[in-house]
Amino acid sequence: MSKIGFFIFVGLVPGALWLVAIFDWVMTLRRKPPLGHRLQEFLLEHPWLAAVLATVYAAMIAHFFLHIDHG
Amino acid sequence: MAVDKDKPAGKVGQAVRAHPDASRAVELVVLGVLILVLGAMLVYGVSRIVSGDVTRCTEKKDATVWPTGVELAAVSVIGFVVGRMVGYLKKSRYGGPLVLSRRLSPDRIIGLGLVCFLVLATVLLGYETFAVFHPSGDPPPITSYVRCAAADNPWVSELAAFIIGVLLGNWIWYPTTKRPWRPWDKS
């Protein structure tokens, strides 16, 4: 593992979500439909995508947190 | 997007709709606190990367084995559910449940954002698969970074997992009575 890898990890996972959260907050502040509203609108049009997103999230939790490897 | 304003909301929904400015303020405060805490944790994480010795992470490879890993998974799921509850504030403020409108033209920006997210997730999972397939640990799998962070400070990692769960639950699991596996449902 390297420091560069850690920077990429921190930047891609919490960092990207942090930027999107700020976007959502600004949209709420400006009385515009927030991201969740727009996303749901899109996912209602494409319900299979909601199932894919939920599956990916569940798989990530299971793999990263519950993957036990003593090797 | 059509909104069914005639459909009666629950007690909380009615209270939220009766006080839209107050509910908006609560929503802004909740999201603002999450953003501030996550931002502080990002700064903390970067400072730990700069000051810490990442070569010692191999000593922490069992970090997410019981109980830390189970706790991380649990707080992620709890955060996801809490995110949906925060979403009720928005749903109630915008009226009733969302109703699918066939007249709606797809939002290209949201669509492109989702495509980018799925491409990124695919690339990361591909990298993870490649890394796990090589038992030598070179290149290191993303799991190693997660475990190292969890071992370095379990409380901060669990708080981060909770906040990420809240945000994702708020965005993805937005309250609606429409069931994704039954696209013909009208509400």
Image (cartoon, rainbow, N blue to C red):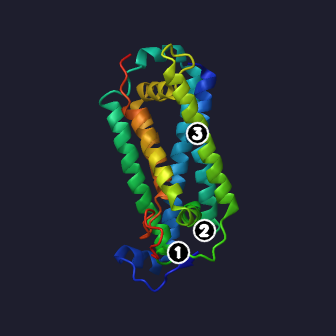
Mark 2 is on which residue type? Pro
Residue B49 at x, y percent in the picture: 57, 24
Badge 1 element = loop
State the residue at coordinates (30%, 31%).
Answer: B67
User: As drawn, is B161 to the left or to the right of A29?
Assistant: left
Q: Which residue matches tag 2?
A: A33
Cβ atoms under marks 3 and 1 closer than 8 Å: no
Q: Residue furthest bottom?
A: B6
Q: Which residue matches tag 1?
A: B94
Mark 1 is on which residue type? Tyr
Q: Residues within 10 Å of mark 2 (few under 14, many from 20)?
A: some
Residue B180 at x, y percent in the picture: 45, 63
Q: Residues within 10 Å of mark 1 (few under 14, many from 20)?
A: some
State the residue at coordinates (57%, 43%).
Answer: B39
Q: Which residue matches tag 3?
A: B122
- Specify which label sits upstream in the sequence, 3 or 1: 1
User: As drawn, is B76 to the left or to the right of A46?
Assistant: left
From this viewpoint, is residue B24 visible?
yes
State the residue at coordinates (36%, 49%).
Answer: B78
Residue B164 at x, y percent in the picture: 48, 46
User: As drawn, is B90 to the left or to the right of A24?
Assistant: left
Q: Residues within 10 Å of mark 3 (few under 14, many from 20)?
A: few
Badge 2 element = loop
Classify the position of the C terminus of chain A by image quarter: top left
Q: Which mark is residue B152?
A: none
Cβ atoms under marks 2 and 1 closer than 8 Å: yes
